């Protein structure tokens, strides 16, 4: 699937396009198909996202989305060396998901 | 240390307000990202993986306690309770919100700090020996010259749009503790036969994708001609630099392509023109700035003996302190490399503890080293036990200066948008493998440096053992290098061979240390043994 990510303009937080707006959670990311560039152009013009880009991801068995590249998986979760600062600090499997 | 005058303060305050307005316009949609990006970078604000990152300049690595307390306050108020000291003696906060960045700059300006020229194609924060002003072996304090170069180059129009970044280091001792020859412009303060002070000048160094060690262009440049010489170097670079190719823009590439002799010839030609213009510092200005760096009022009868009856304290004193120029005093290194922790990271609470120690025991001064540790430069030997006890309490009393666990590592793929691989977990695994202090001491001086990409912020080219993270078809991989050094006998590390995964590179490091232990002669450090026996025995052990 193709998904869109970027950073929130005001806060810098990693955000994912969920089909209608931006979510902090990669599992909300929507497959944008061939509409990625069009969505990015609109969101950039509206100054809601900084450094937005399209990326490849795969749909896992549970339906969640997993970005293809490790850099985006680290962006999705947070620094692997600070599990206390990640979006899922209590999830023991979070590290395995990244690597 | 240097204190702002009304001009410094006015310039920094004006920059804060300018950036506040720029930020307001960006958030209001009056500027595009392409328009705003160079403006935020001019104020040290990057966009990293998880948030904005703010890089704060710590000129020549010198801080006072009030500044460190301010950094602690910013960590608590605007970030996530910690900061990261970098290999350029700066500090980075990794969780900054754009909408709060102008307020942070205003807070920094209150304590004479800023983020100007910590990014972009400019002359970056001037670095210096972190023992400056305290070292027993220095000719003079190099910081007045570092400060003058800072003043002459900040906001200078000719240096505002350089072909690429430009890094300066100044030292004043034979021992190079600042990796001086890995800079674009390295200076060593020396005395000539007549006892006059001047500079050995080393242009053309740098790490990154194409590493070069700076060459010596001058054996002796009279001290008051330094700004003319620097302008001449920058003028020649500005004239010829490959602005069309990002990989060839650094000055080291030009020096390589022109050749050292021709580069020097052109610089000397320009130098004569600048000398005639009379743009160098007059003595009075040197005296004005040097007065800020007068040594503190050391006690003249401070006892030299230290009670080392506590064995843990004895270990710490032997490893973490260095000779001071004043009798009865010691330079005290604070390790930020606790095994299992993140090298260079420091919590706000720890910053407050060290600020208190600096205020009480070190004439209100502290330093940041390029190896990502802190230094209390002027501690009375009689106070060392109290300092150590406070550091133990704050979890800052590790005993590993220059040992195998005192690892430089860039933030890597855990934080950095340029990185290809994570650096910090590799550093943590190596540190855990060698956690036993007796084993570390048996290995002796061994400097490991890890970068998460070819930009080499983790100085892997200068590592006795260097590690470079690379992207191998979407996975992390690590190249191993041996034989690098950033000291007075600077050398560039060489790649051993095929790369490894994360655990594999940790094993390879251990195998390299086994070769050293097997082959070393009396008194040899790891680097000495490598230089004597060469790469082959290491390759055999690692790949055999």
Image (cartoon, coloured by chain):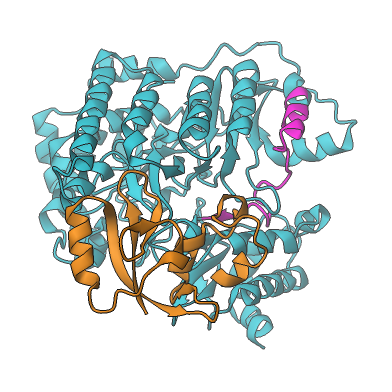
Which part of the image, by quadrant, shows the C terminus of chain B? bottom right
Question: At x 55% / y 54%, what residue is drawn?
Answer: A86
**Residue with the most extreme front position:** A20
Along the viewing direction, whichever of B193 and B266 lies nearer the viewer: B266
Q: Is residue B92 left or right of residue B357?
A: left
Vertical order, B401 against B276 (above or below)? below
Asked where in the image residue A94 lies, by quadrant, the reply is bottom right
Which part of the image, by quadrant, shows the N terminus of chain B? top left
Q: Is residue A54 magenta?
A: no
Whether residue B287 is visible here, answered yes or no, is yes
Q: Is residue B504 left or right of residue B217?
A: right
Q: Where is residue B63 in the image (x, y as percent from the top left)?
A: 48, 27
Vertical order, B499 against B375 (above or below)? below
Q: Is residue B399 magenta?
A: yes
Question: At x 24% / y 60%, what residue is drawn?
Answer: B255
The chain assigned the colour cyan in the figure is: B
Question: At x 47% / y 48%, what residue is drawn?
Answer: B87
Along the viewing direction, whichever of B246 and B186 lies nearer the viewer: B246
Vertical order, B50 against B476 (above or below)? above
- Which residue range is magenta in the image? B386-409
Q: Position of residue B11 (x, y in %)?
A: 23, 23
Q: Is residue B63 left or right of residue B248?
A: right
Vertical order, A79 against B296 (above or below)? below
**Residue with the most extreme bottom position:** B544
Q: Where is residue B105 in the image (x, y as percent from the top left)?
A: 34, 30
Whether residue B188 is visible here, answered yes or no, is no
Tally of marks = 0
Q: Position of residue B526 (x, y in %)?
A: 66, 63
Q: Is residue B452 left or right of residue B222?
A: right
The chain assigned the colour orange in the figure is: A
């Amino acid at each position: 699937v193709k998904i869109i990510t970027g950073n929130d303009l005001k806060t810098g937080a990693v955000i994912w396009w969920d089909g209608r707006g931006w979510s902090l959670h990669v599992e909300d990311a929507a497959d944008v198909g061939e509409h990625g560039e069009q969505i990015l152009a609109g969101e950039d013009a509206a100054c809601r996202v900084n450094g937005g880009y399209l990326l490849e991801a795969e749909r896992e068995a549970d339906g969640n989305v997993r970005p293809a590249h490790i850099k985006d998986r680290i962006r999705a979760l947070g620094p692997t060396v600070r599990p206390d600062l990640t979006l899922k600090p209590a999830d023991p499997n979070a590290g395995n998901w990244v690597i | 240390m240097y204190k702002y005058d009304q001009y410094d303060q006015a310039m920094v305050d004006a920059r804060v307000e300018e950036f506040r307005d720029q930020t307001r316009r960006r958030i209001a949609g009056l500027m595009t990202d392409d328009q705003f990006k160079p403006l935020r970078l001019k104020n040290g604000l990057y966009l990293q993986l998880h948030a904005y990152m703010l890089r704060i300049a710590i000129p020549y690595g010198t801080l006072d306690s009030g500044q460190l307390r301010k950094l602690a306050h910013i960590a608590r108020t605007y970030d996530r309770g910690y900061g990261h000291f970098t290999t350029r003696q700066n500090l980075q906060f990794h969780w900054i919100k754009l909408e709060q960045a102008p307020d942070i700059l205003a807070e920094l300006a209150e304590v004479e700090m800023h983020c100007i020229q910590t990014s972009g194609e400019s002359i970056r924060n001037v670095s210096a020996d972190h023992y400056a002003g305290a070292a027993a072996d220095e000719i003079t304090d190099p910081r007045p010259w570092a400060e003058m170069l800072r003043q002459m180059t900040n906001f200078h129009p000719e240096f505002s749009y350089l072909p690429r970044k430009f890094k300066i280091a100044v030292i004043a001792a034979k021992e190079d503790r600042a990796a001086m020859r890995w800079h674009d412009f390295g200076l060593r303060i020396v005395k000539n036969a007549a006892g006059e002070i001047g500079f050995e000048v080393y242009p053309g160094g740098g790490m990154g994708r194409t590493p070069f060690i700076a060459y010596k262009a001058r054996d002796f440049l009279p001290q008051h001609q330094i700004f003319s010489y620097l302008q001449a170097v920058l003028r020649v670079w500005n004239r010829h630099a490959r602005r069309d190719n990002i990989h060839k823009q650094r000055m080291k590439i030009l020096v390589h392509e022109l050749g050292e002799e021709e580069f020097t010839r052109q610089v000397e030609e320009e130098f004569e023109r600048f000398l005639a213009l009379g743009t160098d510092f007059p003595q009075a200005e040197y005296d004005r700035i040097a007065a800020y760096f007068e040594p503190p009022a050391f006690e003249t009868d401070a006892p030299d003996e230290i009670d080392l009856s506590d064995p843990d304290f004895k270990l710490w004193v032997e490893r973490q302190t260095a000779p001071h120029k004043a009798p009865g005093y010691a330079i005290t290194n604070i390790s930020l490399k606790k095994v299992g922790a993140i090298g260079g990271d420091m919590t706000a609470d720890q910053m407050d503890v060290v600020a208190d120690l600096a205020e009480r025991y070190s004439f209100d001064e502290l330093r940041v080293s390029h190896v990502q540790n802190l230094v209390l430069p002027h501690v009375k030997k009689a106070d060392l036990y109290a300092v150590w006890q406070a550091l133990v309490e704050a979890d800052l009393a590790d005993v590993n200066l220059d040992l195998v666990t005192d690892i430089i590592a860039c933030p890597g793929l855990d934080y950095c948008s340029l990185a290809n691989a994570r650096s910090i977990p590799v550093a943590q695994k190596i540190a855990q493998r060698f956690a036993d202090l007796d084993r570390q001491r048996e290995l002796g001086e061994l400097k490991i440096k890890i970068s998460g990409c070819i930009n080499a912020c983790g100085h892997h080219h200068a590592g006795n053992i260097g590690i470079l993270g690379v992207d191998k078809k979407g996975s992390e991989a690590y190249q191993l290098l041996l034989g690098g050094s950033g000291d007075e006998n600077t050398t560039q590390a060489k790649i051993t061979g095929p790369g490894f995964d994360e655990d594999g590179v940790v094993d390879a490091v251990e195998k390299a240390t086994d070769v050293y232990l097997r082959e070393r002669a009396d008194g040899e450090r790891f680097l000495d043994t490598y230089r004597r026996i060469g790469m082959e025995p290491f390759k055999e052990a690692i790949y055999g």
